[in-house]
Image: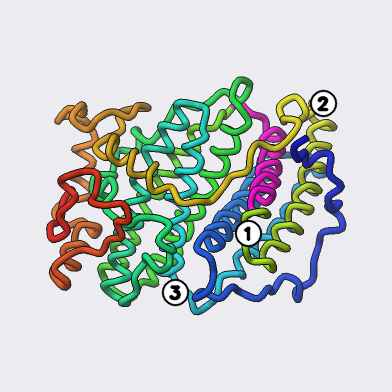
Amino acid sequence: MGFNPLQEKGIPLEKQLRDWSSLNVKPYDKNDVHPYTRCRIIIMNGAEIEGAFFGHQFARHCDDIEIKRNIAMCRRVEQQQQKVVNWLVPANESPLEVTIGYEQVAVDLTAALAKREPHPVVKAALDFALLEDFDHLYRYANLLQMTKGIQAGDLVGKLTEITVGRPTISEHRHPFDEIRSHYSAAQSDIVTKLNVLTIVAAEQQTMNFYMNIGNRADTEIGRALYQEIAQIEEQHVTHYESLADPTMSWFMRDVLHQYSECYLYHSFIDQEPDERIRKIWEMHLDMEIGHLKASCEMMKKHEKRDPAEFLPDALPAPLIMESNIDYVRQVMAQQTDFNARGTEFVPGDQISSDYRYFDYQKMVNADWVPSQELIRQKIGKDKKDYRLEIKGPHPVKRFQKRDQVVR
């Protein structure tokens, strides 16, 4: 039998509040941390923040004081969990170094979700945005090497390649073309629901992070690059959140949020090489089991519906953070020139010259684009861009030259 959180004891919600000393955890050593430990911390920080944000939205749309109190109790604990997770990041890890971790998450988490996604529309959406986040990693890595002399390859542990993806300049699309068709909650697999919740949380956290720290970059080109890529992260949140079935009730969405956090913590326990951090994942899993049970009881009481109707008997196979170089290269070879037209993804040459994409490009890109200017400056300084191409030349021929800025 697999792991079913509803059949585990967990920690009752009312017993989960902690004092300051237990929340103020020791950060990891940035020179010794495993790249995927950093990634798991970023993912769980995003999941906990999404849980808190969702709880606020649920409360703002509810006129029942008992429900509001239950949500507030759970949200207070999740805020404590978020502080523990986020406080694992050390102060001597610069925002730009942390950014490399965020983009490694965006690449390897998206690839991991795409490889197992059963819903064709959701899988296509994951593959499409994967190449854009892959390019963001390349741009930030060049900024890091050019301004700080640090090679991002050392931060990603040579587990993720660093090279041109779908060029950021090409990613700026009209807002209408970021809306996707959504899955059906009644018909779709639990894996699809978990994948969408996970990627929305991760991309939303990336968007929030860049919105808040982008103005802390200490060069003009750095500030401009964060501003540009932060806009793409807004597009990605719109892109991914539109995949979820909007007809789900607030109670169903609440249960799925708690189930998703159980799933992520459970997935990460066995993979975590840092014993101290693994114990945090174990404790938080026990806490999330309590959250899930409380949410299920709310649904039973106020909606007269048993969550067993849509939750499986056991958690799906664990989400594994691992190197996805071959998969990313395959998608790059096939879809680098893809674009969005309405809810569909099509080869770029199928976008007519009078389509709104080109009008939008003219407005926002005009005659200066930070992501392109950065590479111009890097090539001007070092005669070539910064890359980590582990498995040979770029799979798209026009991107193989390192002394030219291409799109």
Of the residues shown, which amino acid type is indicated by label 3?
A: Ser
Of the residues shown, which amino acid type is indicated by label 2?
A: Lys
Between 272 and 365, the residue placed more toward the observer is: 272
Between 357 and 149, the residue placed more toward the observer is: 149
- Residue shown at 53% from the left, 63% from the top: 38
Under circle 3, the secondary element is loop
- Residue underneath mark 1: 272
Callout count: 3
Of the residues shown, which amino acid type is indicated by label 1?
A: Glu
Mark 3 surroundings: few (<14), some (14-19) or many (≥20) residues within 10 A: few
Residue 324 higher or lower than 87, as above or below: above
- Residue underneath mark 3: 94
- Residue shown at 17% from the left, 44% from the top: 397
Residue 131 locus on image (x, y percent): 34, 44
Residue reaching furthest bottom? 92
For the N terminus, give its image quadrant: top right
Q: CA distance from mark 2 to mark 3?
A: 49 Å
